[in-house]
Amino acid sequence: MKLKQLEGCLGDVAAFKDPKVQLEQYPTTAHLASRILYTAESSYGDIDGKAVVDLGCGCGMLSVAAAIMGASSVVGIDIDADALETALDNLEELEISDTVDLIQASLCVRAPDTGELSLNNDLVAKMRGKFDTAILNPPFGTKPGNKGIDVLFLQAACAMADSAVYSLHKSSTRDYLVKRARAWGFDCQVLAELKFDVPMMYKFHKKKSVDIDVDLLRLSRQTRAPSA
């Protein structure tokens, strides 16, 4: 499938009906999603025939794109039941519900005393290494109480994916994420520098839209050289 065809198919994917600011719910555009999945498949062969997981899938834009690009199976995980309801509507409308499974679960847990976030190790353990490829557009962690959530999402993706991870992150976090990826046993490559368009969605927004500089990262599991 050509890039423009993919973007056209994704143009019918419905976004959040009632977005929740604390969850940092901003829609991934068809323009952005098509380029992520098209690159993952056309340049690296990481989608067609692969088992794919979409972390923080929201309304399913990336999951839909993965299914259209030929993934053998897709699992979308999100904490928000309302977003998953919209995602299911999207899957049924596009007749790909047989390829995509949706799971309501939280990738993070919050300490009751400090409110600090940490990885949901029980969930990650159940899904460790179950997928070939992970795709995600995680929360950036800019809202109070969400500090570090972007890193936790990426860490979960690295645990679940056996081959490659594709993720969007603020460009300002690039150097830090490259170091963390290496610590997890992954090489990290910046595939593209993009603009993430944040529309006027919430009451505190003062501008019609704001462009945020983001990196499309590809993390690939490091291979150890065979022993002599």
Image (tube, rainbow, N blue to C red):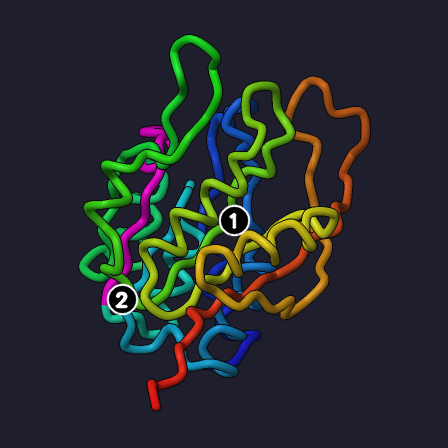
Residue lying at the far top of the rendered structure: 113
The residues bearing labels 1 and 2 have C-alpha atoms spaced at a distance of: 18 Å
Viewer-side residue, 213 vs 3: 213
- Residue at 69% in and 54% down: 175
- Residue at numbered disc 1: 137
State which tag comes first along the sequence, 1 or 2: 2
Q: Quadrant of residue 14?
A: top left
Query: Looking at the rendering, in which quadrant would you find the N terminus?
Result: bottom left
Mark 1 secondary-structure assignment: loop
Q: Position of residue 20 (x, y in %)?
A: 51, 24
Q: Is residue 121 left or right of residue 58?
A: left
- Residue at 50% in and 56% down: 183
Mark 2 secondary-structure assignment: strand
What range of the chain is rendered magenta?
A: 73-84
Q: Total label count?
A: 2
Residue lying at the far front of the rendered structure: 228
Residue lying at the far bottom of the rendered structure: 228
